[in-house]
């Protein structure tokens, strides 16, 4: 049960973050919803077939730091997508760098990510691809 304890410790740290994201439940007020969500995601992640990560980013996503943060965020959202209220399956990075262009890996805070369902996550990444294409076609002016 050390995994659950480390997730709970991380969740406590996230709840202390300022500013607190609107999607975040207060664990003490919504204990049941948070624990149900945590149990659901722990069962899902233990039954996944894991393939060897190919990129540096994929390796990061497979590391304990990210997996713990991911589970804590999904737990603190009560397992709900912050956009549509459907079941959240993913945690979306809102940004990958800080204001000084330094990577946020290993330094993400709750305000840097959000719980989303697969459909909302897909839409985010589709929109990002369109913006990259527009910037490329316009020479960086968008």
Image (cartoon, rainbow, N blue to C red):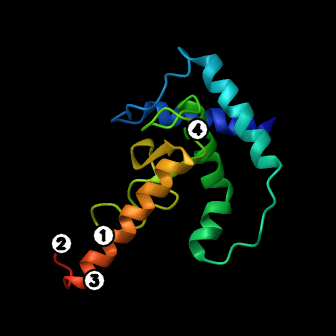
Residue at (49, 25) in percent of width and height: 25
132 vs 98, nearest the viewer: 132
Q: Earlier in the sequence, mark 4 or mark 3?
A: 4
Q: Which residue is mark 2?
A: 142
Residue 136's disc number: 3
Q: Earlier in the sequence, mark 4 or mark 1?
A: 4
Q: Quadrant of the C terminus?
A: bottom left
Structural crowding at the residue carrying mark 3, measured as other residues with C-alpha within 10 Å and reported as few (<14), some (14–19) or many (≥20): few
Alpha carbon distance from label 2 to label 4: 34 Å
Structural crowding at the residue carrying mark 2, measured as other residues with C-alpha within 10 Å and reported as few (<14), some (14–19) or many (≥20): few
Instruction: Count every numbered label the image shows and give the total.
Output: 4
In the rendered image, the vertical position of residue 78 relative to residue 2, given as above or below: above
Q: Nearer the viewer, mark 2 or mark 4?
A: 2
Q: Tell me the SS state at disc 1.
A: helix
* Whether label 3 touches label 1, CB < 8 Å: no
Q: Which residue is mark 1?
A: 131
Q: Tell me the SS state at disc 2.
A: loop
In the rendered image, the vertical position of residue 4 relative to residue 116, given as above or below: above
């Amino acid at each position: 049960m050390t995994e659950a304890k480390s997730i709970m410790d991380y969740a406590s740290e996230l709840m202390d973050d300022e500013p607190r994201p609107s999607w975040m439940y207060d664990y003490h007020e919504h204990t049941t919803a948070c624990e149900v969500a945590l149990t659901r995601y722990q069962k899902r992640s233990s039954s996944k077939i894991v393939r060897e990560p190919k990129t540096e980013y994929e390796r990061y996503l497979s590391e304990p730091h990210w997996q713990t943060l991911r589970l804590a965020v999904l737990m603190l959202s009560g397992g709900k997508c912050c956009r549509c209220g459907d079941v959240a399956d993913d945690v979306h990075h809102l940004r990958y760098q800080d204001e000084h262009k330094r990577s946020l890996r290993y330094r993400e805070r709750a305000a840097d990510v959000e719980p989303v369902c697969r459909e909302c996550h897909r839409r985010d990444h589709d929109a990002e691809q369109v913006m990259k294409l527009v910037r490329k076609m316009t020479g960086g002016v968008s």
